Amino acid sequence: MSIRVAIVGATGVVGQTLLKVLDERRFPQSEVRLLASAASVGRTMEFQGRQLTIAEATPEAFAGIDIAFFAASGEVAKELAPEAVARGAIVIDNSSAYRMVEEVPLVVPEINALDIRFHQGIIANPNCSTIIMAVALKPIYDAVGIKRVVVSTYQAASGAGIAAVEELKAQVAAYVEGRPLTAEVLPTAVAKRHYQLAFNVIPQVDVFRPDGYTQEEWKMMYETQKIFNDRELMVSATTVRVPVMWCHSESINVETKRKLTADHARELFAQAKGIVVLDDPAEQLYPMPIDFPDRDEVFVGRIREDISCDRALNLWAVGNQLRKGAASNAVQIAEAIIKDYA
Amino acid sequence: MSIRVAIVGATGVVGQTLLKVLDERRFPQSEVRLLASAASVGRTMEFQGRQLTIAEATPEAFAGIDIAFFAASGEVAKELAPEAVARGAIVIDNSSAYRMVEEVPLVVPEINALDIRFHQGIIANPNCSTIIMAVALKPIYDAVGIKRVVVSTYQAASGAGIAAVEELKAQVAAYVEGRPLTAEVLPTAVAKRHYQLAFNVIPQVDVFRPDGYTQEEWKMMYETQKIFNDRELMVSATTVRVPVMWCHSESINVETKRKLTADHARELFAQAKGIVVLDDPAEQLYPMPIDFPDRDEVFVGRIREDISCDRALNLWAVGNQLRKGAASNAVQIAEAIIKDYA
């Protein structure tokens, strides 16, 4: 099999990670076409020992493409995804533009790969925090059902793009060198106020909705319901940016429908696809975001029965938001398409 | 009124903050006696324009003292607090040694100042994370009752002492200068493994108990029950260290006994003692730990009705763990003693 692949937004941090993941996973592509805005046209990026030249992301650029990964804004996806589909490509979109559109599957392959069969050309990649949580919830959901989740996140700067990572690095450099710290990117580039992330935590990820939740918090509820195809699965999220580079961490409290012991949960996690259990308090073993710069799995630890509620568990999940939270999940979707959703 | 005060552990970060807070609050002391281990004897510290010389913390050192603030380890408190009491002093202890001893009042003055009247010489200052949460819970508790709290913390390095703050600073300096990062203090000096805090979050504060909870998490449940004198008030905590210097932040989900709207909660917080409301999402106004290096109040924002549960609220609280979480709460207890618990 030989697949012609396009990456829209190739120069961004998710686009770069997509290239890396396609290589690592030996994706069977015969061509990788890098597309970006006019400003990047002519730049080259290395892939498997060759220099690929970036072309402009226009409707015509999708001619002959089988799978188009979109790692760009929602606006770009809205404009160009239908053009790619019209030219015969299947689009896997990392933006939020199509996630809650009813006829667009929203897929985490460990959970609902078979939803891909309903696609009409576009498949959406969920929000990064949602993917990491959903992978961790899946074994519990299957075993005993889930009633309600209360989650607080510890999200890396990279979730706001490479500019946010650079801003964090510049802030700590300024601190060490005794210069004033400046902020122009976080909490989100479109916000009217920007706050220092170094030595701080910012309880805002993405923009606010009129109900006082942020978009990120809203996504963790509604995208999770769609992925599990369960409108009664309730999620209350508080999403917080922390001065970490690459991996998101999540403190997850899960109220289950039937009782599940921590020991049983640990066994379920150990057998689950895409999960690594790191949970030995006596050895101070638990996942931490600095430990996994290049891993695709979701790491789960601090698994314990909730002392405040008879049918609830606490757990701590860490995942690389650029990989499983974005690029790797998208490539897994593409692999599932090739294997007919297997 | 003229009170003779001793500070045990004067050279530590809580001891230093106690001196600062006694001055700021114009505490009516006629004498401040600084006590510490033999290693610090003879050193001086400035207080209200005078140089105070540190004496050794021995039983005899408490002669004539009215109020002894203990800002030392549990071991020191166990050894010397009874000696201070035997010499007529009232001890306000910041360690965990006496907090769960039944006849020792555990006091957050905004909540249970009147419990002081039961004291038999020792009054305990609660854990820093517990104090900050308890102050934020109080108005909700009084208005509609609280069934269960799920809390995830974002705790500053200072909670592990000044050595942890210095370690964090040294790690970011090493990062900026391209040197290897080392860790010898966090997550806790007595732990067998130490982890980098810079660009990381560590889901361990204090040591682990056999049930998989940390001591810190356990304290947030049992100390809160004691402060509110309510053994049915359930708290499930996940306590996490973040690369922040001084203030703790907490993501708090509160299940109430009766329904409380976010608007009503905001009014209650605005009228509550010791709380400042910072909650305007449209203006991106919410509390952040860098904003309050020198404030005693607990700052509350992100107040919203939980979309996953009809009788629950989410909120975000930030407090200075050295001040309201330790020194200022202790001085408030002393003020309440002087005013006969008013």
Image: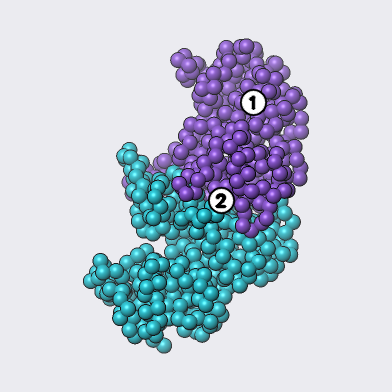
Chain colours: A purple, B cyan
Q: Residue A135, percent across and down?
A: 62, 37
Query: Numbered disc 1: what chain?
Result: A
Q: Is residue B232 left or right of residue B319?
A: right
Locate the N terminus of chain B by quadrant: bottom left
Q: Secondary structure at mark 1?
A: helix
Residue sitting at 68 percent across and 59 percent down?
Answer: B255
Kindly identify the amino acid type of the residue bearing the numbered disc 2.
Pro
Seen from the viewer's position, the closer of residues B211 and B184 is: B211
Q: Residue A57, percent across and down?
A: 59, 21
Query: Numbered disc 2: what chain?
Result: A
Residue assigned mark 2? A203
Residue sitting at 67 percent across and 47 percent down?
Answer: A260
Residue assigned mark 1? A333
Vertical order, B136 against B91 (above or below)? above
Contact? badges 1 and 2 (CB < 8 Å): no
Of discs 1 and 2, which sits in the foreground? Answer: 1
> Can see residue A189?
no
Seen from the viewer's position, the closer of residues B149 and A163 is: B149
